[in-house]
Image (cartoon, helix red, strand yellow):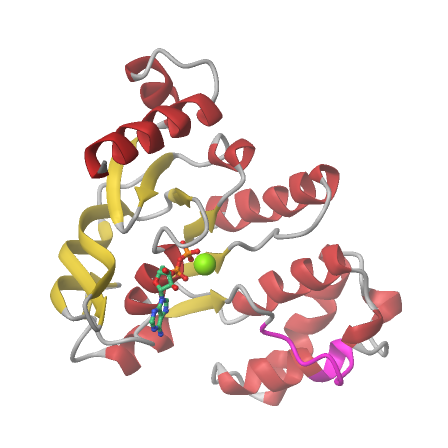
């Protein structure tokens, strides 16, 4: 892994009225890293990710993604990242091939490039035989694999995945993570949110979010050591318990 920093925040904050959804988060992500945001529903993961993707203007604090400012250079950010949102990014009423063409076009690839890369991509994820199928007819796990491949189709520097494996079985989740590792091996930095504790183990570093705050940030091994825990579940339980006590 290189030492180059590709995501950098300093006290980045998002308020909705009086409510602080993401509270002064500060962290750095290195090029090629698989960086996880772990937290319960409502912890502020999606809000943080949307600011980093240039989709939501922060309330305060600083942030740079791929070297670009999250306030002023959001168009530049969008050109350099891929994004797979929590609520599906593919069109259900288009076929597999039509989706690839459509998103390839949005990401600025020429028809020729799209054609050349599409066959390769479909073969890699085992969907060649399904290319004329409507996305709505694919099982959820395949939709997720396709959505991920589409998100990295233009070879972005960083890919943002928001709970990419929600609702699928552990086996399918494992396969999805093989895809993430491949992308990471090819030099793409992966920023992923999840509320599955087992997925935390697959990340190089994990940031644990509770009620808008980053409560801990380290490698899974170091976190377990620090909290005398055997699993990430236990680490998370300790953190969430601490947060509740403070709020009482
Ligand atoms: N546009 C919005 N307006 C008001 N509150 C919001 C908005 N978006 C998110 N929130 C609130 O911010 C909190 C964090 O949400 P979110 O970032 O989606 O959490 P997570 O992705 O970790 O489940 C939640 O309480 C949610 O209701
Ligand atoms: Mg979310």
Percent across and percent down for residue 185 are 49, 44
Task: Judge by depth and name the residue closer to the eye, 118 or 210.
Answer: 210
Q: Is residue 178 above or below residue 84?
A: above
Residue located farthest toward the front when viewing the structure as drawn: 248
Check residue 97 for magenta coloring: yes
Percent across and percent down for residue 144 are 66, 60
- Tell me if residue 187 can be seen: no
Check residue 107 for magenta coloring: no
Task: Judge by depth and name the residue closer to the eye, 207 or 18.
Answer: 18
- Tell me if residue 85 can be seen: yes
Looking at the rendered image, the quarter that the C terminus falls into is: top left
Percent across and percent down for residue 98 are 72, 84
Percent across and percent down for residue 69 are 17, 71
Q: Please tell me whether the stretch drawn in magenta is mainly helix, strand or loop.
A: loop
Q: Is residue 168 above or below residue 240?
A: below
Task: Tally the marks.
Answer: 0
Looking at the rendered image, the quarter that the N terminus falls into is: top left
**Residue at image coords 37%, 43%:** 33
**Residue at image coords 48%, 58%:** 162
- Magenta span of residues: 89-98
The image quadrant that residue 124 belongs to is: bottom right
Side of 40 where 18 appears, left or right? left
Q: Is residue 10 above or below residue 79?
A: above
**Residue at image coords 34%, 63%:** 47
Residue located farthest toward the right when viewing the structure as drawn: 129
**Residue at image coords 21%, 47%:** 28
Q: Quadrant of ligand 2?
A: bottom left
């Amino acid at each position: 892994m290189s030492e180059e920093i590709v995501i950098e925040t300093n006290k980045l904050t998002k308020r909705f009225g009086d409510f602080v959804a993401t509270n002064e988060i500060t962290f750095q992500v290195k090029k090629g890293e698989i960086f996880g945001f772990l937290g319960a529903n409502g912890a502020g993961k999606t809000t943080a990710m949307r600011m980093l993707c240039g989709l939501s203007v922060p309330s305060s604090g600083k942030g740079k993604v791929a070297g670009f400012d999250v306030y002023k250079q959001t168009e530049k950010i969008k050109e350099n990242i891929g994004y797979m949102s929590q609520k599906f990014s593919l069109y259900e009423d288009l076929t597999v091939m039509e989706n690839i063409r459509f998103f390839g076009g949005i990401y600025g690839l020429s028809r020729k490039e799209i054609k050349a890369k599409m066959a390769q991509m479909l073969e890699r994820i085992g969907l060649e035989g399904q290319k004329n199928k409507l996305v709505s007819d694919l099982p959820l796990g395949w939709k997720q694999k396709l959505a991920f491949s589409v998100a990295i189709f233009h070879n972005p520097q960083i890919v943002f995945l928001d709970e990419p494996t929600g609702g699928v079985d552990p086996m399918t989740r494992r396969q999805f993570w093989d895809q993430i590792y491949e992308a990471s091996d090819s030099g793409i930095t992966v920023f992923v949110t999840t509320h599955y504790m087992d997925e935390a183990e697959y990340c190089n570093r994990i940031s644990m979010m509770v009620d808008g705050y980053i409560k801990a940030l380290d490698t899974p091994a170091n976190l377990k050591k620090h909290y005398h825990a055997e699993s990430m579940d236990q680490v998370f339980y300790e953190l969430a318990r601490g947060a509740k006590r403070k709020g009482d």
